[in-house]
Amino acid sequence: MSVGPIALMLATSFKTNVDVYDVSVPAFFFSPTIKNYETVLCNFLWYEPAHVDYCDPTFGRALVNSLIVGLISTGLTLTIGCMAAYALVRFRFMGRGTVSMTTLLMRMVPPAVLLVPVFGIWTFQYGLDQTYTGIILIYTAMNLPFVIWILQSFIVQVPIQLEEAARMDGANLFQVFFLVVLPIIQPGLAAAAIFTFRIAWNEFLLANALSGRSTRTVPVTIVNSITEYDINWGVIMATGMLLAIPPILFTFVASKQIITGMTAGAVKG
């Protein structure tokens, strides 16, 4: 059930429009072509495809926009989230439990509820609509509660004796956090990075409302390519397959960090 739609999307990405609409032939019996991928990636090819009269830079620009938004929002979310989680776990202050529970409750708010107020505030008060900053800030705020919640469970498991030993050796608070705590919670950071990047990469609703012509991400570009006059399913499916590659690579790299962190120190001698 999971592989079926992906296999059908992969097969459609190698079809022409004639093969797509031909219902008399089984879905997986056709003459494959790479024209759809050439149309999508015409800006990145070292040769000029013969069948492409005009090389549309829309997808290339959207791919770069998605990478910028996804990587920067993930970095900001992890940076702020790990510090906030450490403060909630290690520091004693009034209302600590309330703050911790409030961050988790904020995660339960659906993005659709935030669409209208965020669009109004970003557009009419701060002028952040159609900018990278506006999209990155809302993605950071949307993913921050989840990152704080998941990293708290990792920081709690860090022995306090390690931090006390570092303090006795003369390390200050920042050195204890960056040199002692962060290396230990590396699997938690990798897991949080995977989920944060995937959410920022695949999100459509807020990106569609806040992005402009030059800042549209790939999901918005795919939806906008569907018109009432023409639907090029081959190009859309090829774009969808290319859309899945960066999250898979990011997950593969981050998962290796999870395995490295879990097995570090498991074998002695």
Image (cartoon, rainbow, N blue to C red):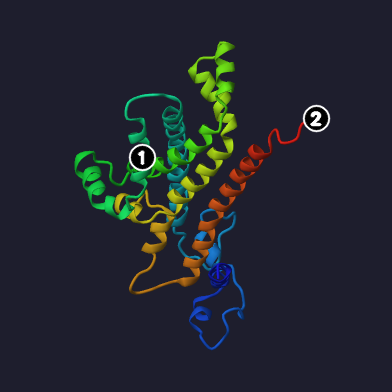
Which residue is found at the position 58% from the left and 39% from the top?
187
**Which residue appears farthest toward the left when viewing the image?**
124
Type of the residue with mark 1: Met
**Which residue appears farthest toward the right when viewing the image?**
269
Type of the residue with mark 2: Gly
Image coordinates of residue 18 in percent, x first then y, are: 50, 80
Relative height, residue 252 to residue 229 (above, below): above
Residue 51 in sight from this viewpoint: yes
Q: Quadrant of residue 81?
A: top left
Label 1: few (<14), some (14–19) or many (≥20) C-alpha neighbours in 10 Å: few
Q: Which residue is mark 1?
A: 101
Which residue is found at the position 33% from the left and 53% from the top?
110
Q: Which residue is mark 2?
A: 269
Which residue is found at the position 25% from the left and 48% from the top?
119
Q: Does residue 257 appear to the left or right of 123 in the view shown?
A: right
Image coordinates of residue 40 in percent, x first then y, are: 50, 61
Q: Does residue 269 appear to the left or right of 215 in the view shown?
A: right
Image coordinates of residue 196 in percent, x first then y, are: 46, 45
Could you give the CA–CA distance between mark 2 and mark 1, rounded to whole angstroms? 43 Å
Q: Secondary structure at mark 1?
A: helix
Mark positioned earlier in the residue sequence (2 or 1): 1
Asked if the residue at tag 1 contacts the one at tag 2, i.e. Cβ–Cβ closer than 8 Å, the answer is no
Which residue is found at the position 32% from the left and 42% from the top?
134
The quarter of the image holding the C terminus is: top right
Q: Secondary structure at mark 2?
A: loop
Q: Does residue 55 appear to the left or right of 170 in the view shown?
A: left
Relative height, residue 30 to residue 3 (above, below): below
Most foreground residue, 198 or 154 = 154
Most foreground residue, 191 or 230 = 191
